[in-house]
Structure formats: structure tokens, C-alpha cells
Image (cartoon, rainbow, N blue to C red):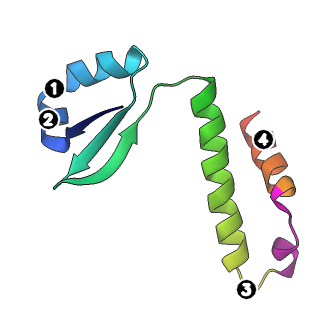
Amino acid sequence: MKTLSSREMQKNFGIVVNLVSAGESLCVTKHGRKAFYIVPENEDTAEMMRKIAGRRLVKNLHSMQSSEAAKTLTSDDITQLIHDCFA
């Protein structure tokens, strides 16, 4: 995975688009710290997005104090809900 600064990305956006379109993943930094990733769209990316969404959803549901029903959902329940949303 290539790493470049946000300034480099701005100056070379066309090259960034070409790299990602060709299947390269990029890490973009801001002030020397990782800020975000740019990944090509493919089946692996879709699965990764489902997993990220699932983790966020589980975290949010567990933090909801007023919803007892949400707290009883299992990881498998959440995974199925996310799969249904992206299907």
C-alpha cells in the first residue's frame, strides 16, 4: 500500500485516480498522521464495508441505554441485518 500526504494527493489527483482504478490501495496522511484510506471498488471492498458497518452498528446499539431489545441482538443478527441492507 502506498502512502502519500494530503498535499501530494491534491497535486496529483489524476495519478491517484489512475492508481486506485488499477487496483492500488492508498493511505493518505495529514500532518504526518494517517487520515484516511482510498481503496478500489471490488468484492473485497464491499465485504470490508459490511464488516465496518457491522462494528459501528454493534457499538452504537450497545451504547443505546434505552433500548433493551437492541442489547439482545447477537453479532450474527447484526451481520444478517447488514447483509440484507447491502444485498
Judging by the rendered image, the residue that carries numbered circle 3 is 65
Judging by the rendered image, the residue that carries numbered circle 4 is 83
Image quadrant where one finds the C terminus = top right
Q: Is residue 23 magenta?
A: no
SS under mark 3: loop
Residue drawn 86% across the image and 66% down it: 73
Location of residue 85 by image quarter: top right
Q: Position of residue 67 (x, y in %)?
A: 80, 80
Judging by the rendered image, the residue that carries numbered circle 2 is 8
Separation of marks 2 and 1 at Cα, in angstroms: 6 Å
Q: Which residues are magenta?
A: 68-75
Q: Nearer the viewer, residue 5 or 64?
A: 5
Separation of marks 3 and 4 at Cα, in angstroms: 25 Å
Q: Residues within 10 Å of mark 1 (few under 14, many from 20)?
A: few
Pick whichever of labels 1 and 4 is earlier in the sequence.
1
Asked if the residues shown at circle 1 and circle 3 are in contact, with their CB atoms under 8 angstroms apart, the answer is no
Separation of marks 2 and 4 at Cα, in angstroms: 36 Å
Q: Position of residue 23 (x, y in %)?
A: 43, 18
Separation of marks 2 and 3 at Cα, in angstroms: 44 Å
- Residue type at tag 2: Glu
- Residue type at tag 3: Gln
Separation of marks 1 and 3 at Cα, in angstroms: 46 Å
Q: Residues within 10 Å of mark 3 (few under 14, many from 20)?
A: few
Judged from this view, the residue extending furthest toward the front is 1
Q: Residues within 10 Å of mark 2 (few under 14, many from 20)?
A: few
* Mark 1 or 3: the one toward you: 1
